[in-house]
Image: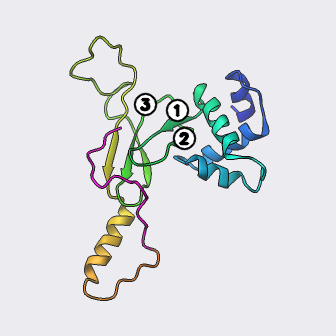
Amino acid sequence: MEDAELLRTAGLRVTTPRLAVLRATASMPHATADDIVTALAAELPTTSHQAVYGVLAALTGVGLVRRIEPAGSPARYERRTGDNHHHIVCTMCGAIEDVDCAVGHAPCLTPSETHGFAVTTAEVTYWGICDRCAAAERDDESTAGAPAATAGAPAATAGAPATPDAVG
């Protein structure tokens, strides 16, 4: 289904900013609002951060976009919705990848106690080090004692958790 039809079916008016944000979230999974504003700058140079936040709230509200909030990171937005997938986050550079549901159908994890809740979703965040950062660490270790070459090395994401104990 085309984006304009998705908006209509969800009960939203079809607007240029909404279509642009849908395209941006489709081409940049796990983008921040700032990433989306930057992506829209050429197409819609007068679009404000507030307008993008408003569009993201509307799209999230009707389930066309999913908001995820890894610990220590700004909110991220993705088009992959409704399948109860999870995420893995690099503790060094902040890269995020999708991880399919661990077992079975949603919520794909069964809590030891529901406290009377009807569980519909399980949200899991795995933390680790991505291949690129692991390779950079191996390179750093192999050149220990020599002047470090930092060109192209991944930068740590501000606010990224230092330990993998944060679970979202």
The x and y percentages for residue 56 are 62, 36
SS majority, magenta: loop
What residue did someone put label 2 on?
78
Cα gap from disc 2 to disc 3, whole angstroms: 13 Å
Q: What crowding class fits label 1: few (fewer than 14 Cα within 10 Å), some (14-19), or many (20 or more)? A: few
Please report contact status of discs 3 and 1: CB closer than 8 Å, yes or no.
no
Cα gap from disc 3 to disc 1, whole angstroms: 7 Å
The magenta stretch is 153-168
What label does residue 161 carry, if any?
none
Which residue is depicted at the point 60% across and 52% down?
Answer: 35
Which residue is depicted at the point 49% across and 47% down?
Answer: 74
Q: Nearer the viewer, residue 49 or 94?
A: 49
- Type of amino acid at the residue the image marks with label 3: Asn
Please report contact status of discs 2 and 1: CB closer than 8 Å, yes or no.
yes
| Above/below status of 163 relative to 135 | above
The x and y percentages for residue 130 are 36, 59
Q: Nearer the viewer, residue 85 or 65?
A: 65
Which residue is depicted at the point 76% across and 57% down?
Answer: 42
- Type of amino acid at the residue the image marks with label 1: Thr
Viewport quadrant of the N terminus: top right
What residue did someone put label 1 on?
81
Rendered image quadrant of residue 91: bottom left
Please report contact status of discs 2 and 3: CB closer than 8 Å, yes or no.
no
Label 2 vs 3, first from the N-terminus: 2
Cα gap from disc 2 to disc 1, whole angstroms: 8 Å
Question: How is the model colour-coded?
Answer: rainbow
What residue did someone put label 3 on?
84
